[in-house]
Image (cartoon, rainbow, N blue to C red):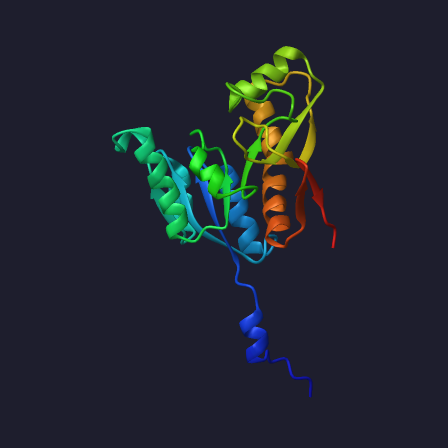
Amino acid sequence: MLDNTVSSKQAAEAKPPMRIAVLVSGGGTNLQAILDEVASGGITDVTIAVVISNNADAYALSRAKNAGVEALCIAPKAFADREAYNEALLGALQERKIELVVLAGFLVVIPPQVVAAYPNRIVNIHPSLIPSFCGKGYYGLKVHEAALSRGVKVTGATVHFVDEGTDTGPIILQKAVAVQTGDTPEILQRRVMEEAEWKLLPRAINLIAHGAVEVTDGCVRIIET
């Protein structure tokens, strides 16, 4: 009979799931996409250790609680100054032994000390094909308003690592989405989320968790297995 048991040595050598933190400011639709993929097995070898928001009223915190994930509000206004907030955020991540930080609609600038503590271990989803419509001032509906105003025929989403700049880190994945006649910023935003964001971010997390992402000279290489 085939013995399917795992030896104690193999068990000791088995790598524990990657501990991730998801940072959000609003409704948390990208968070929900991650939660769903973890639950369905689309993302493996990952544990969502905590969801952190700067907004106590963010519905994303309810999504986390409903999934049995720790939900934590760390709001800048609750601290004497930004430096104290920065230290509190970094401390919360380190206390929970976070290995990957996922920005899923987080509208607070990531502190330099957090970026330094997690080199190529912070990922962000941006609703355009970087380098188009990105950088300071481009977030949320503003991105789609700019795309429609420029008259582009194709937009999309980008998952990238976070560095000291704004949307300047190494690009991990991108997906194009067609702009259609009659699109409003709201309609285009929804299509980009459904067709690109909700697919790219979970895939990027899964690739990173399995060691399939390498960064060399500022460029990402995906190691296909």
Visible residue check, residue 75? no
Residue 165 point in image, percent of width and height: 53, 27
At 71% from the left edge and 43% from the top edge, which residue is drawn?
221
Residue 171 point in image, percent of width and height: 65, 34
* Quadrant containing the N terminus in the rendered view: bottom right
Residue 169 point in image, percent of width and height: 59, 32
Q: Which quadrant holds residue 54? A: top left
At 51% from the left edge and 41% from the top edge, which residue is drawn?
102
Image height check: is 128 above or below 47?
above
Q: Which quadrant holds residue 196? A: top right
For the image, the number of numbered tags is 0
Q: Residue furthest bottom?
A: 1
**Left or right: 48 in relation to 208:** left
Residue 76 point in image, percent of width and height: 32, 31
Given residues 195 and 47, the one toward you in this image is 47
**Left or right: 90 in relation to 202:** left
Visible residue check, residue 74? yes
Q: Which quadrant holds residue 72? A: top left
Given residues 137 and 25, the one toward you in this image is 137
Image height check: is 85 above or below 206?
above
Given residues 18 and 191, the one toward you in this image is 18
* Quadrant containing the C terminus in the rendered view: bottom right
Image height check: is 97 above or below 32?
below
**Left or right: 111 in relation to 74:** right
Q: Residue furthest right?
A: 224
